[in-house]
Structures are given as C-alpha cells and as structure tokens.
Image (cartoon, rainbow, N blue to C red):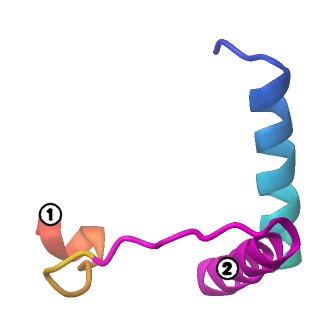
Amino acid sequence: MITNHLLEEKDRIQKKLAQEAQYDVFQYMENTHKIVQEAQEKYGLKLKYVNLQGGTLKPFLEMSA
C-alpha cells in the first residue's frame, strides 16, 4: 500500500479515536462531532453537514440477501 506522512497520521488518529470510543461507531461519531464543534469555535469555522434524502441505510447483510 502506498503511504506517506499524512496518511500515517490519519491512520494513527483514527485508531486513537476508535480506541477512545471503545470501537463503538455511534460513540466514535459523537466524539468526532464534538471535536468538529470545538474546532469551529476555536478557529471561527462554519462547517455544514450534508442532509441526504432517503432515510437510513439498511445493514449490508439484509441488502445482499
């Protein structure tokens, strides 16, 4: 796999965040959202989330069956 310093740092941070969330994807997203909110306040950013239409995603196994 091709790698560089930025990709290695991204992977390191993702692993750290996953451990902090005890590998719970919902907790991971909540923690990440808090980090984004703090960065917005600290740096005066205004970030927007995409509002996708269509409801929720179904689990992969249900879709492939």
| Residue 52 on the magenta segment | no
Magenta span of residues: 23-51
| 50 relative position to 48: left or right | left
| 33 relative position to 59: left or right | right
Magenta segment, principal secondary structure?
A: helix
| Residue 40 on the magenta segment | yes
Residue position for label 2: 33
Q: Position of residue 55 (x, y in %)?
A: 19, 87
Q: Position of residue 52 (x, y in %)?
A: 25, 75
Q: Earlier in the sequence, mark 1 or mark 2?
A: 2
How packed mark 1 is, by other alpha carbons closer than 10 Å (few <14, some 14-19, many 20 or more), is few
Q: Position of residue 9 (x, y in %)?
A: 85, 37
Compare residues 47 and 44 and report the one nearer the observer.
44
Q: Amino acid at mark 2?
A: His
Kindly state the secondary structure of the residue where label 2 is placed: helix
Compare residues 62 and 21 and report the one nearer the observer.
21
Quadrant for the N terminus in the image: top right
| Residue shown at the point (81%, 78%) measured from the top left | 41
What is the number of the mark on residue 5? Answer: none
Question: Which mark is in front, 1 or 2?
Answer: 2
| 59 relative position to 23: left or right | left
> Whole-Å distance between the Cαs marked 1 and 2?
30 Å
Residue position for label 1: 64
| Residue shown at the point (27%, 68%) measured from the top left | 60
- Looking at the image, do the residues carrying marks 1 and 2 touch, with CB atoms under 8 Å apart? no
Q: Position of residue 25 (x, y in %)?
A: 61, 77
Q: Amino acid at mark 1?
A: Ser
Residue at the front extreme?
44
